[in-house]
Amino acid sequence: MIDYDFRPERYYDGTGPSTVLVRLFYPESQWGEEISIYTNVIDGKIHFEAVDFYGNDIHLSPQVSDKPLSLQELILMIETMDINTEAELGNLALTLSGIPEAESTYYPALERYFSEKRKYYGLR
């Protein structure tokens, strides 16, 4: 059973002010799209940023948090990522409509969640 209330104590291991929170892979994308979500600490707050190969402006909600997100909050962030379609490079809007494969050091159940979702929709 997945614990959606799971929340890591912290995101950082002391080696720097930022870390890769999640890597998302979209195997059905003809471009083999990957999106990484990073965290940075600025003025004591955790800031989130999503980055893809093309440098698209990907909107996340929330963009800032006082504490690490719960697994449920992270899933919601991933599933509601949005972009400005007028300025997008590649076809990221179509890619985001898919179900990613996910990797995260901080959220071990995230991979399982998306794997089960992909299987449910016949993508495995």
Image (cartoon, rainbow, N blue to C red):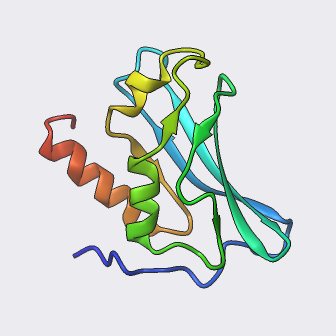
Which residue lies at the image location 78% right of the left edge and 61% below the top edge?
18
Nearer-the-camera pick, 17 or 124: 17
Give the tally of numbered discs: 0
Nearer-the-camera pick, 86 or 50: 86
Q: Whole-percent x and y of residue 38? A: 67, 53
Which residue lies at the image location 41% right of the left edge and 33% below the top edge?
96
Q: Whole-percent x and y of residue 39? A: 70, 60
Where 45 sits versus 102, above or below? below
Residue 35 image-quadrant placement? top right
Where 43 sits versus 51, above or below? below
Nearer-the-camera pick, 72 or 118: 72
From the image, which quarter does the N terminus lie in? bottom left
Residue 59 image-quadrant placement? top right
Where 92 sits versus 114, above or below? above
Which residue lies at the image location 84% right of the left edge and 65% below the top edge?
17
Residue 78 located left or right of residue 83: left
Residue 44 located left or right of residue 58: right
Residue at the extreme bottom: 9
Where 91 sits versus 6, above or below? above
Q: Whole-percent x and y of residue 74? A: 46, 62
From the image, which quarter does the C terminus lie in? top left
Nearer-the-camera pick, 65 or 40: 65
Residue 97 located left or right of residue 104: left
Which residue lies at the image location 42% right of the left edge and 14% below the top edge?
30
Residue 86 located left or right of residue 120: right
